[in-house]
Image: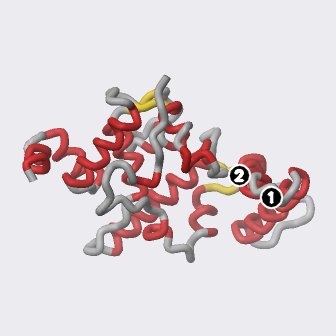
Amino acid sequence: MGTLQSLSDEPEYRELAEKTGFSFEQIGILHKRFKQLSHNENTLRRADLDTIPDLACNPIRTQIIEAFFDKRNFHQNGDGTVEEISFEEFLVVMSHFRPPALNMTEEQREKVRREKLRFLFNMHNTDNDGTITLEEYRHVVEELLSRSGALGKETAKGIADAAMLEVASISMGHMEPDEFYEGITFEHFLKILKDIEIETRMNIRFLNMDTTTLCNTGLPSRE
């Protein structure tokens, strides 16, 4: 209780709570986790996340890690990437996974949904051109399929191409044989996922956990 009270007395923690929606207790837990991962440094680097055991086998591990260093996810209207992130930036990125509050209005819930979908879109729109191209989409699908070992690279590529054509038909409707589908825009992305309740599915459960099990990650060593 004393720790939580001291956190609530700190102006920066009050600002973080307002900015991210996390409670003081949640901020305290995440701050401890941040310090563990960074080995008590004030910034976190890719290397601190890159060797987390539970991420090692994730087929989109690279995209997940890069999301933490992507300025587009800092709520600052920036672009490009950074080499290190502060605790505030770490917390802002983590807030994309926070489940929506039960007392949200429909307007607030829709805003949360769009922010979560924008976060997912940014993960796959790696060159920040506003479109998930066939190449970017193919890369994700190939990684998901080929990492299992059940399919070869060429088979995974064929499935990715077929999936992209299906996405094009959903986004654009009927296409002529000579039409070229440039890729998925954010508006198309919203349309594709309109029936998916992403606002409740895209979250990390961390309540009632101690910092050693937060996000089910292990601790990497910083060389």
For this view, does 178 lie left or right of residue 4? right
What is the secondary structure assignment of the residue under circle 2?
helix
Percent x, y of residue 164: 78, 61
Percent x, y of residue 207: 31, 62
Q: Name the residue under label 2.
A: 140
Q: Residues within 10 Å of mark 1 (few under 14, many from 20)?
A: many
* Foreground pick, 82 / 25: 25
Is residue 182 visible in the rendered image? The answer is no
Type of residue at label 2?
Answer: Val
Which residue occupies the extreme top position in the image? 223
Q: Residue at x 37, y 39 (%)?
A: 89
For this view, does 75 lie left or right of residue 208? right
* Foreground pick, 191 / 56: 56
Q: Residues within 10 Å of mark 2 (few under 14, many from 20)?
A: some
Q: Mark 1 points at which residue?
A: 160
State which quadrant residue 176 falls in. Answer: bottom right
Q: Which residue is drawn at 35% across and 33% down?
A: 86
Give the vertical position of 49 relative to 23 (above or below): above
Percent x, y of residue 29: 28, 49
Percent x, y of residue 212: 37, 49
Q: Residue at x 68, y 56 (%)?
A: 184
* Foreground pick, 46 / 71: 46
Q: Distance between the residues labelled 1 and 2?
A: 8 Å
* Foreground pick, 60 / 186: 60
- Judging from the image, the colouring scheme is secondary structure
**Disc 1, disc 2: CB below 8 Å?**
yes
Give the vertical position of 188 relative to 133 (above or below): below
For this view, does 217 lie left or right of residue 147? left
Q: Answer with mark 1 or mark 2, whichever residue precedes in sequence.
A: 2
Q: Residue at x 36, y 37 (%)?
A: 36
